[in-house]
Amino acid sequence: MNKGNKYYIAHGFFINTARMADKCPTAAVVCNSELKGYRLRFRGADAEAVAAVEPDKDAAVPVLVWEITPADEAALDRCEGFPSLCSKETVKVRLDGKIANALAYIPNIEGLPPGRPGTFHYNNILEGYEAAGFDTGILKKALAESVETEVTPADAPL
């Protein structure tokens, strides 16, 4: 890794390499991994919910690990709404058989109910899961658990 760079894990919108390239053109994919001890959920207003990771000792969330520059991190801070909408945490991930520290943006979900994401947001994450070879069932389960009775994004046709 280049000096000054960090590892960043994407679990939501920026798991999609095209979206990440739009905002952070110098970021480079390192590998697929997983965030152990967390589960994926959607939190927020209906049709505006975002992907969030919540502690769950028995779960794991697929993540895409990126190497980011300080400029990439500044762009992600703006996109993720740091510090008002999320916090930044250092988490442990496995990279090529070794444990490494990585930056994770954790949405401030206190008081946010589970909710349904919009189609654009959900489909971008779904495309990222498919491109990375992740089990899309994990994403679909997160959606179903977040909305409990509805299993489609908010603006999908019925």
Image (spheres, rainbow, N blue to C red):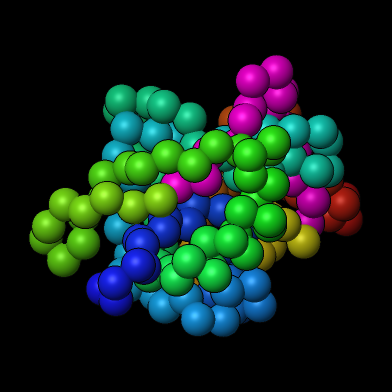
Q: Where in the figure is residue 24, as x and y percent of width and height?
A: 58, 74
The residue that appears at 83% across and 43% down in the rendered structure is 47
In the picture, measured across the screen, residue 102 lies left or right of residue 81, that is left
The residue that appears at 34% across and 52% down in the rendered structure is 102
The residue that appears at 68% across and 56% down in the rendered structure is 78
Is residue 146 in view?
no
Q: Where in the figure is residue 92, as x and y percent of width and height?
A: 26, 45
In the picture, measured across the screen, residue 131 lies left or right of residue 91, that is right
Of helix, strand and loop, which mostly describes the magenta segment?
loop
Is residue 139 in view?
yes
Q: Is residue 82 magenta?
A: no
The single residue placed furthest to the left in the displayed view is: 97
Q: Where in the figure is residue 67, as x and y percent of width and height?
A: 38, 70
Stretch in magenta: 104-119
Quadrant in the rendering for residue 107: top right
The residue that appears at 50% across and 81% down in the rendered structure is 26
Asked if residue 144 is positioned above or below residue 22 in the image, the reply reads: above
Front position in the image: 103 or 56: 103
